[in-house]
Amino acid sequence: MPVSTHNFSVMMQGHSQIENISEPVRRFLASTSIQAGLVTIFVKHTTASVLIIEDDPGLRADTKTVWDSLIPADPAWQHNTGNPGENNGHSHLRGQIQGQSITIPFADNQLLLGTWQEIVVLDFDTRARSREIIVQVMGE
């Protein structure tokens, strides 16, 4: 079964910023000779996640509100108190729950996403940084 792997970086600002990465994933898929199978998208960081959302400004704001409510920033998190200079314990916890990868089926070299579904990176960290994304296509 053929496998093709690609990586790219996205500059993120942290603080639950959402960045749509659907187009780079689609471009890479189109560049392969693989017509049907699975594409896995993985972010190589513990304070960021990859997910599928309806990429609407209201839902972006609601997503930030939900995470701020579920796992608020708190200097008392053990990660923060046990590691001098750290302030992103909540970022790691959010990443643990949301996860770092998704897998999407494709056919005829097209992602089988719903009409409003988009692939995004959600950066939970407390500062700006570049995020490395791995895209791996498997199929025939």
Image (cartoon, rainbow, N blue to C red):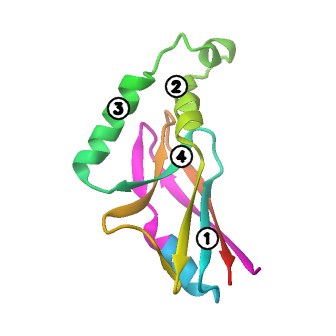
Compared with 48, 140 (above or below) is below
Residue under label 4: 49
Q: Amino acid at mark 2?
A: His
What crowding class fits label 3: few (fewer than 14 Cα within 10 Å), some (14-19), or many (20 or more)?
few
Q: Earlier in the sequence, mark 2 or mark 1?
A: 1
Task: Find the distance from the CA under tag 2 to the CA under tag 4.
Answer: 13 Å
What's the residue type where badge 1 is placed?
A: Leu
- The total of numbered circles placed on residues is 4
* Residue at mark 3 to residue at mark 1: CA–CA distance: 30 Å
| Disc nearest the viewer among 3 and 2 | 3
Q: CA distance from mark 2 to mark 1?
A: 32 Å
Residue at x 22% of width, y 46% of height: 58
Q: Residue furthest right?
A: 1
Contact check, label 3 and label 2, Cβ < 8 Å: no
Residue that badge 3 annotates: 66
Describe the element under mark 4 as helix, strand or loop: strand
> Which region of the structure is painted magenta?
1-24
**Circles 1 and 4 in contact, beta carbons < 8 Å:** no
Question: As shown in the figure, which amino acid type bears the numbered disc 4?
Answer: Ser
Q: Amino acid at mark 3?
A: Val
> Where residue 110 sits: x, y (%)?
48, 80
C-beta proximity under 8 Å, tags 2 and 1: no
Residue labelled with disc 2: 90
Earlier sequence position, callout 3 versus callout 2? 3
Location of residue 52 by image quarter:
bottom left
Q: CA distance from mark 1 to mark 4?
A: 19 Å
Q: Which mark is residue 38?
A: 1
| Residue drawn 31% across the image and 46% down it | 60
Residue 136 sits in quarter: bottom right
Marks 4 and 3, Cα distance to the nearest angstrom?
15 Å
